[in-house]
Amino acid sequence: MDPANGREAVREMTLDVAQGADILLVKPALPGLDLIAAARARFEVPIAAYQVSGEYAMLAAAAERGWLDGRRAMTEAVTAIVRAGAGIVITYAAADIATWLRDER
């Protein structure tokens, strides 16, 4: 699939749902925020998003070098994915985010 062709992605999702898909998965998540939002607006099935290793590594490397606050950047990225419409987020930062959320309580 051509990553620049969002209409093709939505057509594929439409076919997947018509064929009985129980869930739709968008990956990579951050470049696909528009597709997550389109899927959420159009389909009744759960929408999942996978923050692929490259997305995670980009933020982790920048944080390691002191270029950004890793916790804030990762939280903002995952928040954007959820805000776009994903009800399920698969991310390498899951354990860290769970700890951060627990600690904020």
Image (cartoon, rainbow, N blue to C red):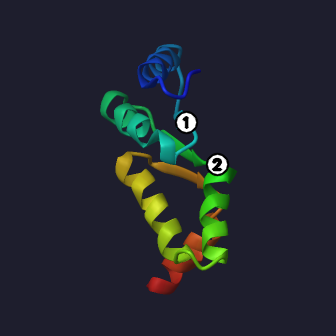
x and y percentages locating residue 28 in the rendered image: 57, 42
Determine the secondary structure under disc 1.
strand
Determine the secondary structure under disc 2.
loop
Vertical order, 78 against 47 (above or below): below
Q: Which residue is mark 2?
A: 52
Q: Quadrant of the N terminus?
A: top right
Vertical order, 104 against 54 (above or below): below
Q: Residue furthest left?
A: 41
**Residue 34 placement, left or right of 32:** left
Q: Which residue is painted at 56% across and 71% down in the image?
A: 97
Q: Give the amino acid type for the residue marked by disc 2 in the picture.
A: Val
x and y percentages locating residue 29 in the rendered image: 52, 45
**Residue 92 placement, left or right of 22:** right
x and y percentages locating residue 60 in the rendered image: 64, 68
The disc, 1 or 2, on the residue closer to the chain's N-terminal end is 1
Q: Which residue is painted at 48% across and 39% down in the image?
A: 32
Q: Give the amino acid type for the residue marked by disc 1 in the picture.
A: Leu
Q: Residues within 10 Å of mark 2 (few under 14, many from 20)?
A: some
